[in-house]
Image (spheres, helix red, strand yellow):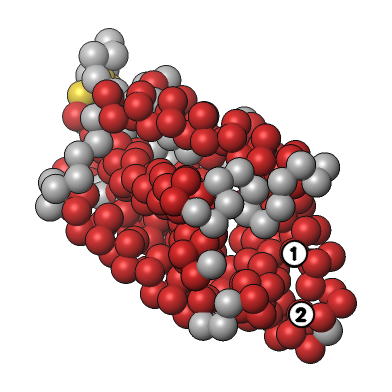
Amino acid sequence: MAGNNPVFAQVNKQIQDGYAGFGQQRTGQPGAQPGGVQSGMQPGMFGAQDAVSQDQLENMYQQPPAGPIQTGRLTVDDVVMKTLGLFALVLVFAAGSWLVTRNSPGLLMPVWIGGMFVGLAIGLAIAFMKKVSVPLIVAYAVVEGVFVGAFSQFMERSYTGIVVTAVVATLCTFAGMLAGYRFGIIKVTSRSRRIFNMAIMGYLLFSMVNIVALLFGWTSGWGFGGNGIIGIGISLLGVGLAAYSLALDFDNIQHAVQAQLPEKYSWLLAHGLIVSLIWLYLEILRLLARMRN
């Protein structure tokens, strides 16, 4: 299962390393019987306590099988709750950043640029760490909220009403991708993953070159493509990639649940969804701005 989002590298590795069957009993051990009772155990071995042990054993046999929650396995509910929590953090800090930068315009660019680079550094740390770091994931949501709030304020000053439109478009796209994946309209295959990976690498390289060109003054505005047909086409490509990234995220979550990974990976999966949502929102903002121009 090739991953699209770098933050899912740990999840994919755990699936490939054989976490399928996590929490299940091992069989085939010498002398083992159902319930973990060794074949050498006979009534009377424990003297006066034997009758109690037998009653306890009967109760164990009558208990229903342990579910994912009891065994510490990942569930869809875990991912949903973590995603909602991180999303709430993003919204709260975005609102705070929006209000601060609106009242203090001089802070707009420092908060926007600083949040962008700090968020990028934390995101890379999460992606390449061997362990799931909950504090870093929470910190990423906070920093990205600050960045998104400041950047949204900047865009709203330039294009009145654009933020509300972008938010509604992002939520509708998310709902549409989820419904499309759920009902099998949007397919995720090995071939589509390979195509996506190649496309996103090319888009990432183009974006990096575009940023360098803007910093050195070689281009202006939104960079290469400008506000014409080519620029709008580039933004449409970005929106399409970000939207399909959500479908791959849904597929990764489904595979992780089926592989019965530990519950701690729900944080990483939720983080991946937040990354894709923020990416989609920024791409939609840029597309709307180019269309307005």
Mark 1 residue element: helix
Depth check: give the residue in front, 1 or 23: 1
Q: Picture quarter containing residue 237?
A: top left
In the image, residue 12 sits, relative to residue 184, either above or below, namely above
Position in image of residue 278 (x %, y %): 52, 58
Residue topped by disc 2: 101
Q: What residue lies at 76% left-to-right and 52% top-to-bottom?
A: 118
Q: Picture quarter containing residue 110?
A: bottom right
Tag 1: amino acid: Trp
**What crowding class fits label 2: few (fewer than 14 Cα within 10 Å), some (14-19), or many (20 or more)?**
many
Residues at marks 1 and 2, CA–CA distance in whole angstroms: 9 Å
Q: Which mark sits nearer the N-terminus, 1 or 2?
A: 2
Residue topped by disc 1: 112
Q: What residue lies at 33% left-to-right and 62% top-to-bottom?
A: 173
Tag 2: amino acid: Thr
Disc marking residue 63: none
Name the outermost residue toward the right: 106
Q: What residue lies at 48% left-to-right and 38% top-to-bottom?
A: 5
274 relative position to 55: left or right: right
Position in image of residue 79 (x %, y %): 40, 55
Mark 2 residue element: helix
